[in-house]
Amino acid sequence: MVMLAALPAVGQDSLRTVPAVAGDGIYSLLRNNGYSPSRHYNAFIKENKDLLTDGELLKVGVVYKLPDTTMATKAKVYGTFDTAIFGEDFASIDSLSTTLKGSVYYLVSGHGGPDPGATETYKGKLIAEDEYAYDITLRLARELLSHGAEVYLIIQDKNDGIRDAKVLDLDSDEVAYPNKTIPLGHLARLKQRTKAINTLYKKHLGKYQRLIVTHVDSRSEGTNIDVFFYYHEKSKSGKRLAESIRNTFTKKYARFQPNRGYQGTFGPRNLYLIRKTLPPMAYIEVGNIKNKKDQRRILDPDNRQALAKWISEGILLDFEKRNRTNTP
């Protein structure tokens, strides 16, 4: 596909523009013009919202504004959340709405510290579940903050930040909220993060609170899976949250992969974090780290950004349903 060069800016304060051609999506248009989709997707949406169909689709021949890259990137504190944890390139967040104002989200990326979770070798390098689950979780946190939510990262790595790379280097310096060493024992780790979540939940009683747990699955190499969603069998609110995210994925697959369809599992599970944590929650498995097709979903930074974006859209849908039904 031949890309048309971006038109030069007319003045110092003007934004660059570029016409969309057949086959363009926002991700490809940004990347082909030297922009990181992870960093600039929301800024592009904000600049061009009146020129997009269904909120995110380009129209062939329409000229779009490219984001301003001259603005300084500065970390900002959102309540108790310091965006410096996203890394220098992602610390600046475009405010898209205040839709989630008054809501509280606890985000847990699977494993961490002494436990890397599922591992696999990719092109001679070791890749691990905890690094990819954490990267998706950071991206999700950034999306939720852009809509006015209060966000808590239960697992944190002070020096990784969001990484636009396929191979994410392993380390073991993650900590549990607020800054506790993650223990080696499996049950001890689960109890530690459960205690952190439940303590914060009690602190915020009366607010709309939800929990999102993100993992990467490990199955046989030949098993290609779609994104899975689980919830507590007795939690109507948790089921609604998981269902809202699942429905968002179903619609996205129908739009972007119409010949494939979405067949991810959706149902209750009896896992420790699902049973023991207080907020209604959705437990998400984003793919099989050993499967080559699933690796494309997990390793490609644009795909990790899309996963975070789609999850956040499902969360917004769940919150809007809550407003319509007046249920907690």
Image (spheres, helix red, strand yellow):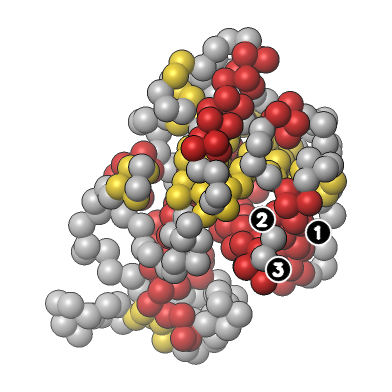
Is residue 313 at least partly visible in the picture? no
> Which residue has dot 2 on it?
328
Q: Type of residue at label 1?
A: Tyr
- Which quadrant of the figure has residue 243? bottom right
* Label 1 vs 2, first from the N-terminus: 1
Q: Which residue is more in the foreground, 88 or 146?
A: 146
Closer to the camera in the image, 160 or 199: 199
**Numbered tag placed on residue 262 in the rendering:** 1
Distance from label 3 to label 1 (Cα)? Answer: 28 Å
Single out the residue that lies furthest toward the front. 206
Q: Amino acid at mark 3?
A: Thr
**Above/below status of 291 relative to 8:** above
x and y percentages locating residue 132 in the rendered image: 56, 37
Does residue 74 appear left or right of residue 35 in this picture? left
- Mark 1 Cα-neighbour bin, 10 Å: few <14, some 14–19, many ≥20: some
- Identity of the residue drawn at 54% across and 51% down: 207
Residue neighbourhood size for the residue with mark 3, other residues' Cα within 10 Å, grouped as few (<14), some (14–19), many (≥20): few
Kind of residue indicated by mark 2: Pro
Residue at 44% of width from left, 55% of height from top? 145
Q: Position of residue 227 (x, y in %)?
A: 74, 48
Q: Secondary structure at mark 3?
A: helix
Q: Position of residue 158 (x, y in %)?
A: 37, 30
Q: Taking 304 as reference, is 114 above or below it?
A: above
**As rendered, which of 143 and 298 lies closer to the eye?**
143
Dot 3 and dot 1 residues touching (CB under 8 Å): no
- The quadrant of the image that shows the N terminus is bottom right
In terms of image quadrants, where is residue 248? bottom right
Left or right, 105 with reference to 272: left
User: Alpha carbon of mark 3 to alpha carbon of mark 2: how far?
Assistant: 9 Å
In the rendered image, which residue does mark 3 sit on? 325
